[in-house]
Amino acid sequence: MRVGVCVICLVAGASAMYGYLQYGPGLRGLYAAQWQEGGGRAELSRMRLALVQEAASRAAAQKAAEAWAAEVSRLEVALRFLHEHGASR
């Protein structure tokens, strides 16, 4: 079973490498032509905007995680207090 999976992966990898070597240079020329036509600048602008949005969402997620960590810490202190005073009754 494992040997069959390895053989399938080897064949798939060889096929991908053959396709890249066969068609890769033509595709690079196609992308270079699109870049020179001005499409590259628009794509670059979209990528920059996406990076800014991702950074903002990461900052918001980090802020939320810190707020939740503070809340968990506060609740742990309250729970410890209740356990200590509940046991003394």
Image (cartoon, helix red, strand yellow):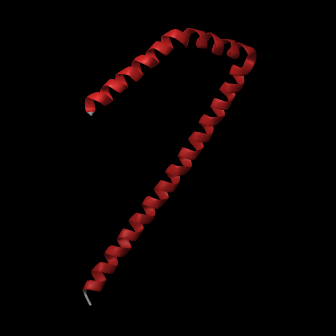
Residue drawn at the location 59% of the way across and 35% of the way down:
51
Q: Nearer the viewer, residue 29 or 63?
A: 29
Residue drawn at the location 46% of the way across and 19% of the way down:
16
Q: Residue furthest bottom?
A: 89
Q: Residue furthest right?
A: 37
Check the image and report above or below for 43 versus 86: above
Horizontal and vertical percent position of residue 5: 32, 30
Horizontal and vertical percent position of residue 53: 62, 40
Residue drawn at the location 25% of the way across and 87% of the way down:
88
Question: What is the quadrant of residue 32 in the picture?
Answer: top right
Q: Nearer the viewer, residue 38 or 9?
A: 9
Horizontal and vertical percent position of residue 44: 66, 25
Q: How many marks?
A: 0
Horizontal and vertical percent position of residue 89: 26, 90
Residue drawn at the location 30% of the way across and 83% of the way down:
85
Q: Nearer the viewer, residue 84 or 46?
A: 46
Considering the image in quadrants, where does the N terminus appear?
top left
Q: Nearer the viewer, residue 22 or 81?
A: 22
Check the image and report above or below for 33 versus 71: above
Q: Is residue 86 left or right of residue 51?
A: left
Q: Is residue 42 left or right of residue 77?
A: right
